[in-house]
Amino acid sequence: MIRGILFDKDGTLFDFQASWGAWAAALLHRLSPDPDPLARRIRFDLRTQRFAPDSPVIASTSAEVADLMLPDLPDWTRDDLLALMNRLSADAPMVEAVPLAPLLEGLTARGMHLGVATNDGEAPARRQMERAGVDRLFPFVAGFDSGHGGKPAPGQLLAFCAATGLPPSQVAMVGDSAHDLHAARAAGMAAVAVLTGPALRGDLERLADVVLNDIGELPAWLDETG
């Protein structure tokens, strides 16, 4: 029986393209008068402001994304670039994949333990959830810089189990990328995929126990699984 749900953030709680497309375009133009090389490195279409399904940004940590762009940014240091990205991302206009508060309150009412495991930084993640009014519903939040590593390694997921006292077999990891699902497998958790990120169904269904359109379908899935 599932008693805990650990959510990825971008592409899961928040619609990936709607939340990050315009933000990424603005960042690249801010970083360089010629943003095309940067866009190619992260597989981002500046014209449509959309990420390709195989964009490394989908699953990488913020630090890994910064490392990808640095070769085209000779005037930037890694620390300065990462600090700028974290500062700007904290105030990114996040678009909820579904109305979050009623869904999460309903899951909490079922007795579910809820948490967030993201490859974003912990501070911007907490800020975004605070702005969405759902920070109080997540006693556990881990970013790539929280001391547990990043996905696809299972450190964040196992830290959630330690914090809640739940065995991995009673936890579902919900995410929109292969990294999320690989982390779930490594931790011994149920692997639940959602389609609110750039990844395609065919890329996720071979790795997941179930593929949902969005997290709004979680209550029905929980009812089916008992």
Image: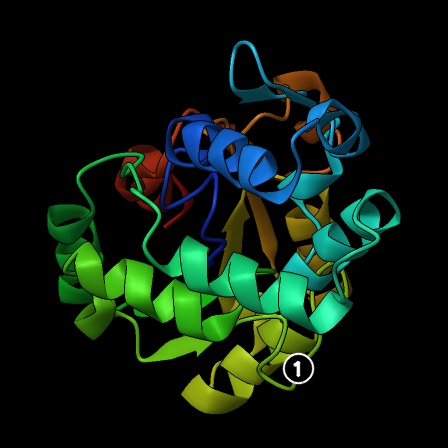
Reply above or below: 126 against 26: below
Tell me the residue at 29%/42% (across/down). 93
Tell me the residue at 42%/24% (across/down). 213
- Residue 114 placement (x, y as % from top left): 34, 68
For this view, does 125 lie left or right of residue 37? left
- Residue 162 placement (x, y as % from top left): 54, 89
Tag 1's secondary structure? loop
Disc 1 designates what residue?
A: 148
Tell me the residue at 14%/52% (across/down). 101
For this view, does 128 lie left or right of residue 111? right
Tell me the residue at 75%/67% (across/down). 78
> Can I make out residue 56 in this image?
yes
- Residue 82 placement (x, y as % from top left): 63, 64
The image quarter in which residue 212 lies: top left
- Residue 74 placement (x, y as % from top left): 84, 53
Mark 1 is on which residue type? His
- Assess disc 1: are there few (<14), some (14-19) or many (≥20) residues with their C-alpha within 10 Å of its C-alpha: some
Reply above or below: 119 against 176: below
Identify which residue, 187 or 80, lies in the foreground. Answer: 80
- Circle count: 1
The image quarter in which residue 186 lies: bottom right
> Can I make out residue 3 in this image?
no
